Image (tube, rainbow, N blue to C red):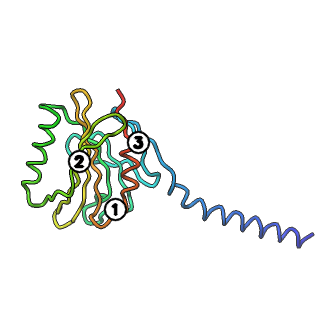
Amino acid sequence: MRKYFIALLVILFLVFTAGCTSNSDSRTNETITLTQNGVSFDYPGTWVVATSKANDTIVSVADPRSVNTATGFAETVVTIQRINRTGTFNSMYDQNYATLFNNSSYQRVSESNITMGNVQARENVYTVDDNGILKQQRAIWIEDSNQIYVILCSALINQFERERQNFDLIVNSFKIIN
């Protein structure tokens, strides 16, 4: 009887230990839906809602594993901005990037017109030297009534392609809620 009791304890210990190790990574494939400030989107379960220093930010999420210890800010982040339209959508977009690319710290990688669901949008991918930190950013501009929404995906230049799946999750699930 004692042998069975010890064997049962060993089996329970193994099951408990196996359960603990498999659960430690349970958020890796999980997604979280965030609905806030008139927008909704899914983001990776390992990421967190973040505070952004960018103007017009309505919500931001970031990978906490990408926090730069020197600055305290995450390097892998998606920020959603809402801008009041003061001209045509295209003129505001064009003016923004004419100004941005006039600064030698910014270099265009690509630019395209895209469709998000049934909405036309504009996408600009570029690199930026942010005080010696090289980043790649993907900005998607979407027009809705008198508002322009910008989804800005940013990561270190050598991490950007690795983060593409996470960025696509957010971009492809993005909805404006009226």
State if disc 1 and disc 2 touch (CB < 8 Å). Answer: no
Q: Is residue 162 above or below residue 61?
A: below
Q: Is residue 116 left or right of residue 95?
A: right
The CA distance from mark 1 to mark 3 is: 19 Å
Q: Secondary structure at mark 3?
A: helix
Which one is closest to the eye, mark 2 or mark 1?
2
Front position in the image: 8 or 152: 152
Q: Position of residue 12 (x, y in %)?
A: 76, 64
Q: Give the mark nearest the N terminus, 1 or 3.
A: 1
Q: Secondary structure at mark 2?
A: strand
Q: Secondary structure at mark 1?
A: helix
Front position in the image: 110 or 77: 110
Residue that badge 1 annotates: 161
Outermost residue on the bottom side: it is 3
Front position in the image: 138 or 37: 138
Quarter holding residue 161? bottom left
Q: Is residue 162 above or below residue 113?
A: below
Tell me the amino acid under the disc marked 3.
Answer: Ser
Q: Is residue 35 left or right of residue 131?
A: right
Residue that badge 2 annotates: 112
Q: Please rate how many residues cluster around mark 3, counting C-alpha atoms within 10 Å: few if below 14, some from 14 to 19, many from 20.
A: some
Q: Position of residue 46 (x, y in %)?
A: 45, 55
Residue that badge 3 annotates: 173
- Quadrant of the image for the N terminus? bottom right
Q: Which mark is residue 94?
A: none
The CA distance from mark 2 to mark 1 is: 18 Å
Q: Position of residue 86 (x, y in %)?
A: 12, 31
Residue at image position (32%, 58%) is: 76
